[in-house]
Amino acid sequence: MSKLYSLCLATTVAATAMASIALMPSVSHSQSTSALNKTIDSEGNIRLPEVDFRKEWAALGAWAVAAEEGTQGSKGIHMVYTQPETVDAYRKTGKFPDGAILVKELLGAKTADMTTGRISRAGDIEGWFVMVKDSTGKFEKTNKLWGKGWGWAYFGANDRVKTTTVDYEAECLACHIPAKDNDWIYTEAYPVLKN
Ligand code: HEC
């Protein structure tokens, strides 16, 4: 067998083995891995997940922000989404698993009288808050978007890639202190996490 031939053969075998390894993992595992790989880079920078989360992910729940005193209805609606695997893991363990991504979409609200009564409905998108779970604290010493076992970032509606958040501790943490003993997350509004 010539050297060149055996080299080609070895390469083909290796390529075939790699292709079958790449195809082997279960669909849900590879989906969540790819969502995660596209959401955080090797330095821990975070972008809005590229996946169509409104359609592909689980809706955890919604928050309606009350309008100012004297006005009726809501002035904003917050919709929160996560990967379906995160819901499965949370139902089993009561915890958010590493790789969990939470997206809170901020929507304006419009209030109108309809046949059901006075109703507030979702309006335009204003931006997104994103959190990514990593209990190993991999980026916590080198990237100020990371701490307390999470990555934290906000995106205005006009830029899904570059976060406006510089320092999670200054910009996010204080408001999440009431949920500190619940891994910093306000799960009380997320019925899908309960079995
Ligand atoms: C003004 C206070 C405040 C600030 C600042 C804040 N949060 Fe929150 N956040 C909340 C509250 C309260 C909720 C739940 C109720 C709601 O959405 O209004 C929440 C919910 C969330 C959720 C949905 C998951 C959950 O905890 O229930 C995410 C994701 C989130 N915040 C990320 C962030 C990130 C990232 C930052 C910083 C860039 C940030 N928040 C800054 C108060 C705040």
Image (cartoon, grey):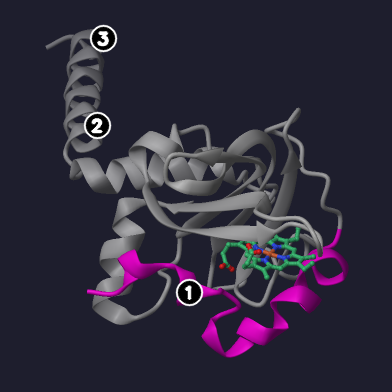
Instruction: State the SS at label 1.
Output: helix
Can you tell me which quadrant of the image ligand 1 is in? Answer: bottom right
Q: Is residue 94 left or right of residue 169?
A: left
Q: Main secondary structure of the magenta part?
A: helix
Mark nearest the camera among 1 and 2 is: 1
Q: Between residues 110 and 71, which one lies in front from this camera angle?
A: 71
**Between discs 3 and 1, the one toward the N terminus:** 3
Q: Which residue is mark 1?
A: 187
Q: Which residue is mark 2?
A: 18
Q: Residues within 10 Å of mark 3 (few under 14, many from 20)?
A: few
Mark 3 to mark 1 CA distance (whole Å): 61 Å
Q: Position of residue 178 (x, y in %)?
A: 67, 85
Residue labelled 1 has its Cβ within 8 Å of some atom of ligand 1: yes
Label 3–label 2 contact, CB within 8 A: no
Disc 3 marks which amino acid? Answer: Leu
Instruction: State the SS at label 3.
Output: helix
Q: Which residue is mark 3?
A: 4
Relative to 25, say whether 138 is above or below.
Answer: below
Residue at 82%, 71% (x, y): give it.
169
Q: Is residue 19 left or right of residue 189?
A: left
Residue at 30%, 42% (x, y): give it.
30
Residue at 52%, 32% (x, y): give it.
50
Mark nearest the camera among 3 and 1 is: 1
Instruction: State the SS at label 2.
Output: helix
Please report the bounds of the magenta region as a residue range.
167-195
Mark 1 to mark 2 CA distance (whole Å): 41 Å
Q: Position of residue 135 (x, y in %)?
A: 53, 74
Mark nearest the camera among 3 and 2 is: 2
Q: Is residue 179 left or right of residue 194?
A: right
Tag count = 3
